[in-house]
Image (cartoon, rainbow, N blue to C red):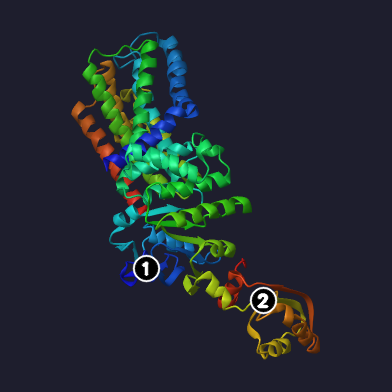
Amino acid sequence: MTAAIATIWSKHMSKFVKNGEEWMATLFMPILWILLFGAGMKAMMGDMPLAGTDLPYVAFMAPGIVALTALSGAVNGGATLLDEKLRGILKEYLVAPIPRLSILLGNMLSNATKSLLQAIIILVVAVLIGASLSGNVLGWLLGLALMLVFALGFVGIASGVAMRAPNTGAYHALIFILNLPLLFASNALYPIDIMPAWLKVVAYINPTTYIIDLTRNLWFGAATTINGWLSVGVVLAWGLLGTWLGYASFKRSVR
Amino acid sequence: MSSERVLAIETDDLTKRYDDDILAVDGLNLEVGQGITYALLGPNGAGKTTTISMLTTLLQPTGGQATVAGFDVVEQPDQVRLQIGVTFQEIVLDPDLTGRQALDVHGRLYRQGKAERRQKIEELGRLVELEEALDRRVKTYSGGMKRRLELIRGLMTEPRILFLDEPTQGLDPQNRTAIWEYLHRLRSEGDLTILLTTHYMEEAEALADRVGIIDHGRLVVEGSPEGLIEDMGADVISVSGRGDRSAFLEAIKARAYVQHVDESEQDIRIGVDNGNHRLAELVGLASQDGFVIQDVSIAKPSLGDVFLKYTGRQLRDR
């Protein structure tokens, strides 16, 4: 099982490392967010903490941008799986003596790994333009690990949709419904306290809110607005749910 | 002894009915002995790919049984997977990998050691004359090179049984003959069993020890290519023309030297003992009976004629 997962994981990673376009495409948008949007907000507010929070805006938004990147990374991951399904590349795996689950997990893990690398790069950029990290290195790592679990949950769902989608158009339509709303209907760009009541409800249903609240604390030392253990629980449950959904859909689609 | 050997592939009323009630494979009974090359010949849509998909554990049969290398495809899919190599009808390669990476990933999926993988890649790259191209990305390959790469990917793990689904589909004649040559070389070298599907009768004639003609998901007739063709008579005279055929048909069927007559819309094909001798007489029969011949030709019979005889349709009808 692990050998097969490692093979599929390393195949995708070696493609990723050599594919300049994929790097550009996946990093361009988040860095643009941080540099342009972040710089604009910073020009407006200086290094003052954002109203109702204890973080300057660049640090406030960085976890949200990391989560956004994980979401778009997951969309790409599902698209890779869909592409392999439509081209028939999956069949090479399916006739091989490897557990079916390893095909899905190899794909999901390579994707989550990419999200992790991107998260680190975004954090570095955020620090370069003035966000200051908390002093707790263990907290950074814990934050990254939880972000990985969060990414896995979304990759699982994207993979599940990919296995059922008849073509790329249908896939992107379905995924689009999930992707941007998860960002905007969360605490990624503005604090939850200032939201209208209906948006608050949506934000509290949205698992993105919990990972962002957690990593703001773990990476930048902000006070949590949601009980930390509750957030950890939500993130872990989300990771499991997404993986399970991905697996259930995958199992139905292959023998 | 040979009669007690396990068959490489055996199916017993193998059936696949899809959800939309299409019967793709309809009670197929196949026996493929070890070490032979067996061609399933039939038009597109005859059930060849569905059969291969079931035998390679990609699809679950809805009826009947099948064993590959002695293992049941439903009960023991993992053992089956260990024994087989497969190439698919469409080209199934990752365009962003180099040829070497594609082969290496494949070997790793089967848990081959590093040294073994390297040695197999060199050896097989030489076999299909791809050594020069192995470090280029697959997307720079021509169609023929991709097919060759897929062929050796199927051979990486030294399978006992190799499944080739339309191995030369979409290739020009030159590349097609090249693939045939590699397959000939493989056969002469070892005890590999090959099951291939094709809708090119030339391919079945060139490669197969045994041919099974398949149509509408059923095996119509089976035998060695030579045997099947011999039964067709020494020569086939094809006649096409205008007018009422029936009297003409009756007249030719009455001749002792006419071995069989097959009709299609385009032409009438008459198997005879000696085409050159009988041509004049057969043409004479037509003009007496109000059937006007427009075109006539003599050819050696082919598997296409065999197909026509048993199914009533041209192999290339589509």
Residue A124, image x and y in percent? 36, 16
- Disc 2 or 1, which lies upstream in sequence? 1
Q: Is residue A242 visible?
A: no
> What's the amino acid at mark 1?
Glu
Q: Residue furthest left?
A: A229
> Dot 2, how many residues are within 10 Å of its Cα: few (below 14), some (14-19), or many (20+)?
many
Residue A235, image x and y in percent? 26, 33
Compared to residue B49, the image places residue A151 above or below, namely above
Q: Is residue B117 left or right of residue B293?
A: left
Compared to residue A64, the image places residue B10 above or below, namely below
In the picture, the quarter occupied by the N terminus of chain A is top left
Compared to residue A29, the image places residue B209 above or below, namely below
Give yes or no for contact between labels 2 and 1 (Cβ–Cβ under 8 Å).
Answer: no
Q: Look at discs 2 and 1 and give the one toward the viewer.
A: 2
In the picture, the quarter occupied by the C terminus of chain A is bottom left
Q: Is residue B114 visible?
A: yes
* Residue located at (52% from left, 55% from top): B167
> What's the amino acid at mark 2?
Val
Q: Secondary structure at mark 2?
A: strand
Q: Which residue is mark 1?
A: B10
Residue B317, image x and y in percent? 62, 68
Q: Which residue is mark 2?
A: B236
Task: Please report, as a chain letter, where disc 2 is located.
Answer: B
Res B303 quadrant in image: bottom right
Q: Is residue A145 left or right of residue A79?
A: left
Task: Please report, as a chain letter, where disc 1 is located.
Answer: B
